[in-house]
Amino acid sequence: MDDPELVRTTEATSDLAGCWADYLRPLRFDHWIKNLVVPAGSTLALAAHRIVPDWGVVGTAGLAFLISGFVSSTNYAINEVLDARFDAQHPVKRERPIPSGRVRVGPLLVLTAVIALTAFAGATWLFPPAFVLANLALFLAGLLYNVPPIRLKDWPYLDALVESLTNPIRLSIGWCAVLPTNLATPPILLLVAVWAFGAFLMTGKRLAEFRLLGSGAARYRQTFESYSVRALFGVQLGYAIAAMLALGWFFASERPQLLRSLPLIALILAWTFKMTFERESPLIDPEHLYRRPVFLIFSLALFAGMVAWAVR
């Protein structure tokens, strides 16, 4: 027979562990897949200047990924606090820790402040000013997107445009981490292309959510009142064209050998368009694209091939 006291102690320990897990969930560590743009930026910086990385550079890039990840987690936690009343209207997101009542806002904000201060202290101590400023830009972009009275998240179409700016910022973080200060400026056309690709994905996410939620979409997010499937698709297509034009211009002027990759990049865009219109589109939670391993493997292989072509 089980000891009643032991059973109560085990249950209390389990409840405590669950409590801690709930407070960590708003930090969205699973969303760090978006921060892979940071090591991608480091890789592109090294390839652009034909620098052969050693283990020190690899460690620096990894540390940059961690610091920017904690800055992103700070933004995610703030987002969950401010979106709790909207998430309560969502069929899936209402189970998040705050709208479900499992997490109190005060302790979560204290934890978030500690993480943010630690991240910026590490950035200031270990990296050049350009890296610190890029992380500060990432943090401020999150505040502008989430915090009233500006709260760009509530501006139709502008929301995806602004949210996608975090992608060139992340690329700049990775770029600045591994290069000397005098080289720590990514090409403008590359930044524009990365921004446009991000806006393409974010608009696809809006379209997929709009189709999933149907008539109840506006209860979850007010901006959906201004959307239609046709309009969102047109905007998404516009971003795809802008991304291809910027990337093609960049390749033609800086790395002509990469022009051969444009048809394969167009294939990835077409593949993404297809996923946008799936019944349970993975674009609703882009951080879960790992559930599409063929798509990810193809995309990563193409990126690796492009880096190899670029250094020739």
Image: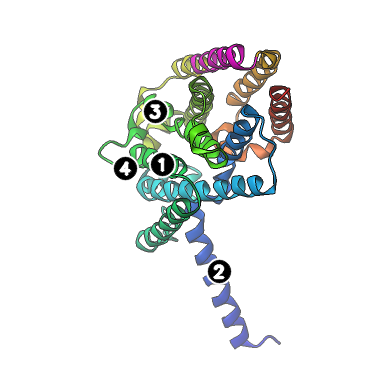
> Which residue has dot 4 on it?
147
Instruction: Answer whether residue 273 is visible to the viewer in this image.
Output: yes
**Horizontal arrangement in the rendering, residue 4 relative to residue 206 (left or right):** right
* Element marked by disc 4: loop
**Badge 2 element:** helix
Q: Is residue 260 left or right of residue 114?
A: right
State the separation of the CA atoms marked 1 and 3.
34 Å
Q: Residue 241 in magenta?
A: yes
Q: Where residue 229 sits: x, y (%)? A: 47, 19
Residue at figure coordinates x 64%, y 35% from the top left:
43
Give the mark toward the camera: 3 or 2.
2
- Of the two numbered discs 3 and 4 on the same chain, state the one appearing first in sequence: 4
Above/below status of 14 relative to 273: below
Tag 2 residue? 17
* Tag 1 and tag 4, C-beta contact below 8 Å: no
Residue underneath mark 1: 133
Numbered tag placed on residue 224 in the rendering: 3
* In the rendered image, the vertical position of residue 311 relative to residue 84, given as above or below: above
- Which residue range is magenta in the image? 238-255
**Where does the image place residue 205, in percent across and percent down from the top left?**
51, 30
